[in-house]
């Protein structure tokens, strides 16, 4: 382990819960930001299904020059 000596400074009984708590808070913050700043993620979590894609509209007929 590269940073194994950190446990000589910080007790594992303090450092491990602190590390895991930081990861959990960061994860919740990212998910909250995605839920509040996107329109597709709340729909995904709600279970909305996406229907078949509509066929592309035919281009309007170009008028012949007069």
Image: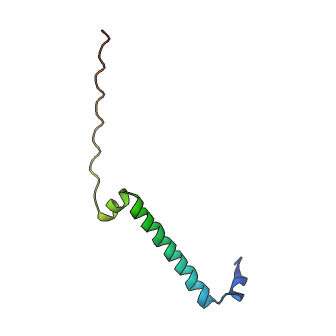
Q: Is residue 32 left or right of residue 21?
A: left
Q: Residue at x 31, y 28 (%)?
A: 59
Q: Is residue 56 left or right of residue 23?
A: left
Q: Is residue 25 left or right of residue 35?
A: right
Q: How far across and down, in percent of the image, does residue 19 sit?
A: 58, 80
Q: Residue at x 57, y 83 (%)?
A: 18
Q: How far across and down, in percent of the image, does residue 36 sit?
A: 39, 63
Between 13 and 32, the residue placed more toward the observer is 32
Q: How far across and down, in percent of the image, does residue 10 sit?
A: 67, 87
- Name the quadrant containing residue 64: top left
Using the image, determine if residue 44 lies above or below residue 13. above
Q: Residue at x 27, y 47 (%)?
A: 52
Image quadrant holding the N terminus, namely bottom right
Among all residues in the image, which is located at the extreme top? 66
Q: Give the total of numbered labels.
A: 0
Image quadrant holding the C terminus, namely top left
Q: How is the image coloured?
A: rainbow
Among all residues in the image, which is located at the extreme front? 36
Using the image, determine if residue 43 lies above or below residue 26. above
Q: How far across and down, in percent of the image, does residue 16 sit?
A: 58, 84
- Name the quadrant containing residue 41: bottom left
Q: Residue at x 48, y 71 (%)?
A: 27
Q: Is residue 8 left or right of residue 64?
A: right
Using the image, determine if residue 40 lies above or below residue 17. above
- Name the quadrant containing residue 42: bottom left
């Amino acid at each position: 382990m590269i940073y194994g000596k950190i446990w000589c400074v910080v007790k594992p009984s303090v450092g491990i819960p602190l590390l895991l708590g930081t990861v959990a808070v960061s994860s919740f913050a990212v998910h909250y930001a995605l839920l509040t700043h996107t329109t597709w993620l709340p729909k995904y979590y709600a279970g909305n299904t996406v229907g078949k894609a509509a066929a592309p509209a035919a281009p309007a007929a170009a008028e012949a020059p007069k």
